[in-house]
Image (cartoon, rainbow, N blue to C red):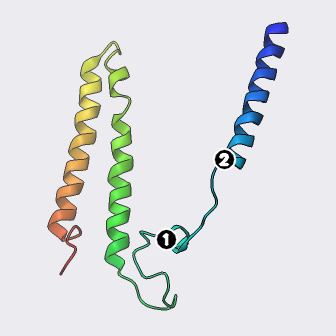
Amino acid sequence: MNLISTIIIITASLSMILATISFWLPQMNPDTEKLSPYECGFDPLGTARLPFSLRFFLIAILFLLFDLEIALLLPLPWANQLPSPTLTFIWTASILILLTLGLIYEWLQGGLEWAE
């Protein structure tokens, strides 16, 4: 019980010290560059009623889709330790084939073209 209370006291005090340092240490000098939004796809200073390019959001959604699908392949180093590595290979190959077919489909449909 003594070890647990010591660990809790050390963690709490270290957290409070780090929170205090992070509050007092940074210099707060905001300027227009730091306060302006970026990578939003359209001019943030104009009116909100202007039409925007739907292609920008299509590319962003495709990126998120393929990026999240790649996350399915992250457990592969641990999956090789399974009793049946053939099953792991089959699932991995099916995910990669599905991603490749989706990319080819989007490419052929012109979804990856920036300019028309």
- Which label sits on residue 33? 1
SS for callout 1: helix
- Taking the image as drawn, is residue 1 in sight? no
Q: Say which residue appears at 30% left-offset and 16% top-offset.
A: 84
Give x and y (percent) for residue 17: 74, 34
Give x and y (percent) for residue 31: 56, 71
Q: Mark 2: which amino acid?
A: Leu
Side of 46 relative to 58 (left or right): right
Q: Mark 1: which amino acid?
A: Glu
Q: Quadrant of residue 115?
A: bottom left
Q: Report the quarter where the C terminus lies.
A: bottom left
Q: Say which residue appears at 41% left-offset and 89% top-offset.
A: 51
- Which label sits on residue 116? none
2 or 75, nearer to the observer: 2
SS for callout 2: loop
Q: Quadrant of residue 73?
A: top left
- Which label sits on residue 25? 2
Q: Say which residue appears at 27% left-offset and 33% top-offset.
A: 92
Q: Say which residue appears at 76% left-offset and 17% top-offset.
A: 7
